[in-house]
């Protein structure tokens, strides 16, 4: 087995973030060094309480560093998505007696996520890949604070943006890029290797029927039962689904690291609209003359072998955490 890739996951859990975390933790190809939280789907306190809670359920025998970051975008008011993920950010599962979560969990989590990102990336012997599953506020702040340290990153893998698939929060913008367009544009202009998984791909990746939750709910271990109940609720409550479909946005970004051969990538110089008009947060390919401004091209997933990726994600979630790091 080749050595596993060290990763740091920055996240705003979030139903699909929870599935992405479960996927990463169940994948021997990846070594999760740290998890950092950012405000996005829900406020920072809820995202952080969820991350702590998820690590206990998904990786009960592992000590994974956790830190919380920005409660607001770099230059704007926070926009959240409780209507999609539920007020607890996890499709209401924490109101279920078996899955209760303390709402004060976040108080014990250090608030130094940006320093943690810089430290984990800047001091690791093997280059760390940053997997960004929420608004890019923490990652952009780390690039601003210590670009030379961040240049040691292997890549920044981002779930966000939309090339030709329209938006999911406005007709033009995907949620992560809409919430913090300045941060998204800064990351894309940073000169670091950036791999983007946009809605063009994630709209093709869905759990559409009850077979997945049934398989997970039939597992004896609490991890499987939790994931099954989470998917059941998310689909039933329509929190993140469209007509009972649960879109696998964040697991898709992890999937580009696990199964790159199943994704079609294109190279694009990208900008993000930082205005206040309708196109706020829209991701756009720029002409090559932007390349001269240090804006290196990002690798963008433009298509995917959807059935293969969904079934591999599901099999990984079902097989579960029987990997030792
Ligand atoms: O647009 C989808 C993205 O926004 C996902 O990361 C989802 O969790 C939300 O953060
Ligand atoms: Ca997310």
Image: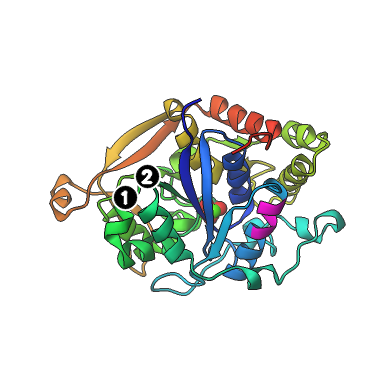
- Around disc 1, counting alpha carbons within 10 Å, would you say few (fewer than 14), some (14 to 19), or many (20 or more)? many
Region in magenta = 52-56
Tell me what residue is drawn at x 46 percent, y 26 percent. 262
Q: Position of residue 311 (x, y in %)?
A: 61, 27
Q: Residue at x 75, y 37 (%)?
A: 213
> Where the C terminus falls, by quadrant?
top right
Residue 177 visible within the image: no
Left/right of residue 286 with respect to residue 177 in the rendered view: left
Q: Quick one: label 2 or label 1, which is nearer the N terminus?
A: 2
Labels 2 & 1 near each other (Cβ < 8 A)? yes
Q: Is residue 172 above or below residue 79?
A: above
Residue 269, numbered circle: none
Classify residue 143 as left or right of residue 315: left
Q: From the image, tell me which residue sits under label 2.
A: 127
Q: Residue at x 46, y 59 (%)?
A: 135
Report which residue position mark 1 lands on: 152
């Amino acid at each position: 087995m080749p050595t596993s890739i060290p990763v740091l996951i920055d996240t705003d859990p979030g139903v699909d973030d929870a599935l992405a975390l479960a996927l990463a933790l169940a994948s021997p190809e990846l070594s999760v060094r740290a998890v950092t939280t950012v405000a996005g789907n829900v406020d920072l306190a809820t995202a952080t309480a969820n991350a702590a809670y998820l690590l206990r359920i998904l990786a009960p025998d592992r000590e994974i560093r956790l830190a919380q970051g920005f409660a607001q975008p770099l230059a704007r008011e926070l926009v959240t998505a409780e209507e999609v993920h539920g007020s607890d950010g996890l499709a209401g599962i924490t109101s279920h007696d078996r899955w209760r979560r303390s709402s004060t969990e976040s108080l014990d989590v250090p608030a130094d996520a940006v320093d943690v990102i810089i430290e984990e990336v800047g001091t690791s012997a093997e280059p760390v890949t940053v997997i960004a599953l929420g608004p890019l506020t923490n990652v952009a702040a780390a690039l601003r604070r210590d670009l030379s340290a961040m240049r040691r990153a292997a890549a920044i893998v981002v779930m966000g943006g939309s090339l030709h698939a329209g938006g999911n929060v406005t007709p033009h913008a995907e949620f992560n890029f809409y919430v913090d367009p300045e941060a998204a544009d800064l990351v894309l202009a940073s000169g670091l290797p950036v791999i983007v998984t946009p809605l063009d791909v994630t709209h093709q990746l869905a759990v559409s029927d009850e077979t997945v939750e049934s398989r997970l709910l039939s597992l004896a271990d609490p991890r499987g039962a939790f994931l099954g109940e989470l998917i059941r609720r998310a689909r039933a409550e329509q929190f993140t689904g469209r007509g009972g479909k649960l879109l696998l946005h964040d697991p898709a970004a992890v999937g580009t690291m696990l199964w790159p051969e199943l994704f079609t990538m294109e190279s694009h110089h990208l900008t993000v609209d930082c205005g206040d008009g309708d196109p706020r947060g829209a991701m756009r390919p720029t002409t090559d003359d932007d390349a001269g401004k240090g804006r290196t091209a990002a690798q963008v997933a433009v298509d995917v072998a959807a059935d293969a990726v969904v079934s591999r994600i599901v099999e990984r979630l079902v097989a579960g955490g029987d990997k030792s790091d």
